Image (cartoon, coloured by chain):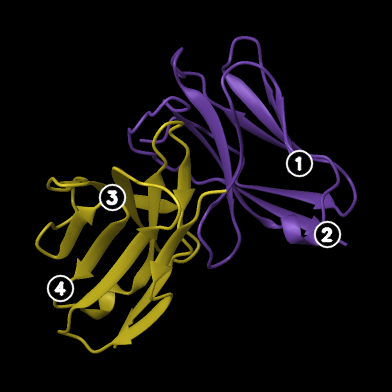
Chain colours: A purple, B yellow
């Protein structure tokens, strides 16, 4: 079973920040939080991942709470092309972890003009 | 970044035939690859874990004789849907783990339609 829960859908205005929450209350100490997104009929695209510190890259920022039981993916300036299903996943990774990845239902983000 | 390529991206076949889908890691060696299946408007469902040089590990409810997985090299895993039927029509996605840093990359997916 998936170890994360996300809202099924969210809307965001173009140009505004999109904040996508994820709950992972049973996360283990060695599990990372990964975010992927899937645009219709394509394979999932990696966005960002983190262990306990906040992370930022050219696509997004990841804010992880101090107790690591939840996190938020932030798309700072959403565009229409960011409309996709966003998946939050926990897994042992970063150092050669090879366990399977189980997807939850994700959040369908719709960016409106 | 690392690239995982699937082929074919789309395939249409007649009921009763077998279809092979390839998953290649283009610029890294992947000791572990995963195969997923996705129905319309649903999430990805893990079918099996493929390890190079050994038998695949199938998830509960997935027929190993129906979905044959071969991982003969560090850059190639194949999924063969045997004696395909219309209910096997789906979007099949593979992913591969890049050794060293454990990052996971996904293929573009293969859409199978069985008539």
CA gap, disc 4 and disc 1? 42 Å
> Judging from the image, what secondary structure is the residue with disc 2 in?
strand
Report the label total. Answer: 4
Say the numbered circle drawn on residue B74.
3
For disc 2, the marked residue is: A112
Q: Residue at x 53, y 34 (%)?
A: A5
Instruction: Pinpoint residue A75: horizontal percent, then vertical percent.
Output: 77, 42
For disc 1, the marked residue is: A58
Does residue B37 appear to the left or right of B69 in the view shown? Answer: right
Which residue is more in the foreground, B26 or A83?
A: B26
Q: Nearer the viewer, mark 1 or mark 3?
A: 3
Chain label for disc 2: A
Which residue is more in the foreground, A111 or B78?
A: B78
Disc 1 to disc 3: CB gap under 8 Å: no
Chain label for disc 1: A
**Residue farthest to the left?**
B65
Which residue is more in the foreground, B87 or B68?
A: B68
Q: Nearer the viewer, mark 2 or mark 1?
A: 1
Q: Residue at x 43, y 75 (%)?
A: B9
The image quadrant that residue A48 belongs to is top right
Neighbour tally class for label 4: few under 14, some 14-19, many 20 plus, Cα within 10 Å: some
Q: Is A62 rendered above or below residue A79?
A: above
Q: Nearer the viewer, mark 4 or mark 2?
A: 4
Give whichever of discs 2 and 1 has the lower sequence position: 1
Instruction: Pinpoint residue A62: horizontal percent, then vertical percent.
Output: 69, 29
Same chain for marks 4 and 1?
Answer: no
For disc 4, the marked residue is: B82
Does residue B21 appear to the left or right of A42 in the view shown? Answer: left
């Amino acid at each position: 079973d998936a170890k994360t829960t996300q809202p099924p859908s969210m809307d965001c205005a173009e140009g505004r920040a999109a904040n996508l929450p994820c709950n992972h209350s049973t996360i283990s100490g060695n599990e990372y939080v990964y975010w992927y997104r899937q645009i219709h009929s394509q394979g999932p695209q990696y966005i960002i991942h983190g262990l306990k510190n906040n992370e930022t890259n050219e696509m997004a920022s990841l804010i992880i709470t101090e107790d690591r039981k939840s996190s938020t993916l932030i798309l700072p300036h959403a565009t229409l092309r960011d409309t996709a299903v966003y998946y939050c996943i926990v897994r042992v990774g970063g150092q050669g972890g090879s366990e399977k990845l189980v997807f939850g239902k994700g959040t369908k983000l719709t960016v409106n003009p | 970044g690392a690239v995982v390529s699937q082929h074919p991206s789309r395939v249409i076949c007649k009921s009763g035939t077998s279809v092979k889908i390839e998953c290649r890691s283009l610029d890294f060696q992947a000791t572990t690859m995963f195969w997923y299946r996705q129905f319309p408007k649903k999430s990805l469902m893990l079918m099996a874990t493929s390890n190079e040089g050994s038998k695949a590990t199938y998830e509960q409810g997935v027929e190993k004789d129906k979905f044959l997985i071969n991982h003969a090299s560090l850059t190639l895993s194949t999924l063969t849907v045997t004696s395909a039927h219309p209910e096997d029509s789906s979007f099949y996605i593979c992913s591969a783990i890049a050794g060293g840093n454990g990052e996971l990359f996904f293929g573009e997916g293969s859409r199978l339609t069985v008539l």
